[in-house]
C-alpha cells in the first residue's frame, strides 16, 4: 500500500494542487474473536464540488489449524457534484493474495438537497480463491465474479436528527453453495473480519444519528445473508463522535454481531479525524 501513502502525501503538500479542504484520519477495531484491523483514510476537496478520497487497511484474524489470516484493503475514489446530482467512481482491492482476494469497481449516482440524499450504487467484484488442503494434497484456484446493485438514502428530520437506509443485492456467476462450500467455511469463518463476510447475497441496514451539542450519537443496524451457506448475520453498533481539539474529533464505537456462521461477537473501535481548510 505504499503507493497510496505516497499519493496522499503529494495531495496534501504539493503546491500544484489547490486544496480546498480535507479530512484525514485513522482507526483500529478489535473483536472478541481476537480479530484486529487498522486503517488510514483521507478525503481531499479541490473545489466545493470535486473530491478525491481513499483508504488503506490491514486486518489480522486467527483461523482454525493455527493459521493467521492477514488481509489488506485499499481503495481510491473520485466524487463530482453537479448540483443537485453527483457521481462517484471507485476502485478497490481487498483480501489475501495467497488465499482469497477481490478487485472491485464501483460507481454511484446521487441526488441531494438540504433534507435528502438518494444514491444508486453499482458494483463489480472479481474474486480469486486459492483452495488448499491440510493434508498437503494439490489445491486449485477458483475464479468468479459478482455484480451488485443497491440504493441508499439519508434524510434530515431536523437540524439535529437524521435517518439513513441502505441495501445492496449481489448476483454471482457461480453457485457458491456448491463450489467448495466446506473449503470456504473451514478457513474463512472464524470472525466478523473473516473473508467469508465479503461473500454476501445482500446487505441491508438502517440507522439514526443525533447531534447533542458538539457530540454526535449514531445507532446503526445491519443484516446480511452469506452467499456460501445462506447464513444470516445481524449487527448493531453504537458510535459516539466528540471533539478532541479545535480541528479534530475522536469516535468510539461499540457493537455486537449475532451470526449463524461465527456466533455472537462483540467489537470495539476508535477512530481519529483531523480537519483542514485552504
Image: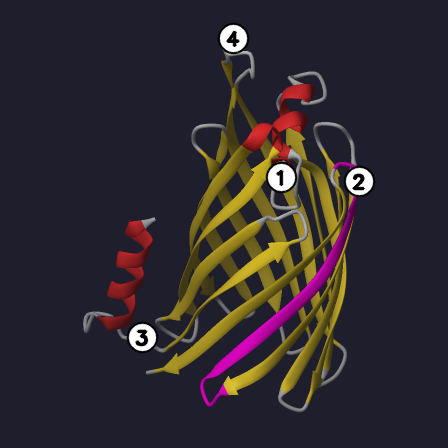
Residue 258 belongs to magenta span: yes
- Residues packed near mark 3 inside 10 Å, few (<14), some (14 to 19) or many (20 plus): some
Q: Nearer the viewer, residue 5 or 23?
A: 5
Q: Position of residue 60 (x, y in %)?
A: 52, 45
Of tags 2 and 4, the one toward the viewer is: 4
Mark 2 or mark 4, which has the lower sequence index? 4
In the drawing, what numbered circle is on residue 19? 3
Q: What is the spatial separation of the Cα atoms under label 3 and label 4, in whole angstroms?
A: 55 Å
- Residues packed near mark 2 inside 10 Å, few (<14), some (14 to 19) or many (20 plus): some
- The answer, for residue 94, to whether it is visible in the render is no
Q: What is the spatial separation of the Cα atoms under label 2 and label 4, in whole angstroms?
A: 32 Å
Helix, strand or loop at label 3? It is loop
Point 64% across, 62% down: residue: 268
- Residue beneath disc 1: 148
Of tags 3 and 4, the one toward the viewer is: 4
Please say if 195 is above or below 242.
Answer: above
Q: Residue furthest front?
A: 66
- Residues packed near mark 4 inside 10 Å, few (<14), some (14 to 19) or many (20 plus): few
Mark 3 or mark 4, which has the lower sequence index? 3
- Residue beneath disc 4: 137
Point 75% across, 56% down: residue: 256
Mark 1 or mark 4, which has the lower sequence index? 4
Of tags 3 and 2, the one toward the viewer is: 2
- Residue beneath disc 2: 232
Amino acid at each position: 500500500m505504499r503507493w497510496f501513502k505516497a499519493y496522499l502525501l503529494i495531495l496534501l503538500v504539493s503546491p500544484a494542487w489547490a486544496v480546498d479542504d480535507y479530512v484525514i484520519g485513522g482507526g483500529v477495531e478489535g473483536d472478541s474473536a481476537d480479530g484486529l484491523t487498522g486503517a488510514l483514510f483521507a478525503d481531499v476537496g479541490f473545489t466545493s464540488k470535486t473530491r478525491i478520497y481513499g483508504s488503506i487497511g490491514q486486518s489480522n484474524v486467527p483461523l482454525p489449524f493455527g493459521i493467521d489470516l492477514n488481509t489488506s484493503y485499499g481503495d481510491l475514489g473520485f466524487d463530482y457534484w453537479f448540483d443537485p446530482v453527483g457521481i462517484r467512481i471507485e476502485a478497490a482491492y481487498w483480501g489475501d493474495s495467497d488465499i482469497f482476494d477481490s478487485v472491485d469497481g464501483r460507481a454511484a449516482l446521487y441526488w441531494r438537497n438540504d433534507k435528502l440524499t438518494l444514491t444508486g450504487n453499482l458494483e463489480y467484484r472479481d474474486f480469486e480463491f486459492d483452495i488448499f488442503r491440510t493434508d498437503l494434497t494439490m489445491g486449485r484456484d477458483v475464479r468468479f465474479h459478482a455484480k451488485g446493485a443497491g440504493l441508499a438514502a439519508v434524510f434530515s428530520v431536523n437540524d439535529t436528527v437524521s435517518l439513513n437506509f441502505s441495501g445492496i443485492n449481489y448476483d454471482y456467476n457461480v453457485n457458491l453453495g456448491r463450489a467448495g462450500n466446506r473449503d470456504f467455511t473451514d478457513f474463512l469463518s472464524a470472525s466478523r473480519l473473516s473473508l467469508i463476510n465479503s461473500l454476501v447475497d445482500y446487505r441491508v441496514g438502517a440507522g439514526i444519528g443525533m447531534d447533542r451539542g458538539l457530540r454526535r450519537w449514531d445507532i446503526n443496524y445491519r443484516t446480511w445473508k452469506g452467499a456460501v451457506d445462506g447464513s444470516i448475520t445481524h449487527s448493531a453498533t453504537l458510535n459516539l463522535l466528540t471533539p478532541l481539539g479545535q480541528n479534530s474529533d475522536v469516535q468510539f464505537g461499540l457493537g455486537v454481531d449475532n451470526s449463524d456462521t461465527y456466533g455472537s461477537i462483540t467489537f470495539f473501535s476508535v477512530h481519529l479525524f483531523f480537519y483542514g481548510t485552504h
